[in-house]
Image: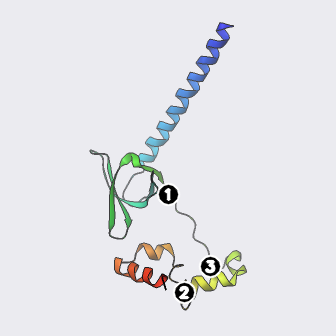
């Protein structure tokens, strides 16, 4: 009976160490992908693009928006954000709902600026961002 308990105890210890090794390997693999230009998410929910990595001090400089940077500890970066596939304009779902397509593409709509593509918002200047945000409040 005691031998069975020892075997079960040894099994649990083995699985615990194995899981920890897998997590460490995943973290090491992810940290090896920390290069400038990679989109990441921090553990506290901020999304940004890596500008530089300081290996000596374990710091990462992130660009949160054009002209806005933040320096965080390397361990605060929790995951790499994979790029999503862009939606094709001739997609069946977009064509099925014409009102949604009009608000996203119509210059006369009040939500046209809010529905601007994220790619365009990434490359706008701070002045353009303020103008866009002021236009959304009307």
The residue wearing badge 3 is 89
- Residue 19 image label: none
The outermost residue toward the front is 138
Which element carries disc 1, helix, strand or loop?
Answer: loop
Residue receiving disc 1: 81
Q: Label 2, on which residue? A: 110
Distance of label 3 from label 1 (alpha carbons):
24 Å
Instruction: Please name the residue shown 38% across and 80% down the image.
Output: 130
Quadrant of res 126: bottom left
In the rendered view, would you say 84 is above or below 108? above
Q: Which quadrant would residue 14 be assigned to in this image?
A: top right
* Earlier-in-chain disc, 2 versus 3: 3
By what rule are the colours in the image chosen?
rainbow
Tell me the crowding category of disc 2: few under 14, some 14 to 19, or many 20 or more residues within 10 angstroms, Cα based.
Answer: some
Query: Image point 67% across, 84% down: which residue?
Result: 99
Give the Cα separation between the discs numbered 2 and 3: 21 Å
Residue 120 in the image: state x and y as whole percent. 46, 77
């Amino acid at each position: 009976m005691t031998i069975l308990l020892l075997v079960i105890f040894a099994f649990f210890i083995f699985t615990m160490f194995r899981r920890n090794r897998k997590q460490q390997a995943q973290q090491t693999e992810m940290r090896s992908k920390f290069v400038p230009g990679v989109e990441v998410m921090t553990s506290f929910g901020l999304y940004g693009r890596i500008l530089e990595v300081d290996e000596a001090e374990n710091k990462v400089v992130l660009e949160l928006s054009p002209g806005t940077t933040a320096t965080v500890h390397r361990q605060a970066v929790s995951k790499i954000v994979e790029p999503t596939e862009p939606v094709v304009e001739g997609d069946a779902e977009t064509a099925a709902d014409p009102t949604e397509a009009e608000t996203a593409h119509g210059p006369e709509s009040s939500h046209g600026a809010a529905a601007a593509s994220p790619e365009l918002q990434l490359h706008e200047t701070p002045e353009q961002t303020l103008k866009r945000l002021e236009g959304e409040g009307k």
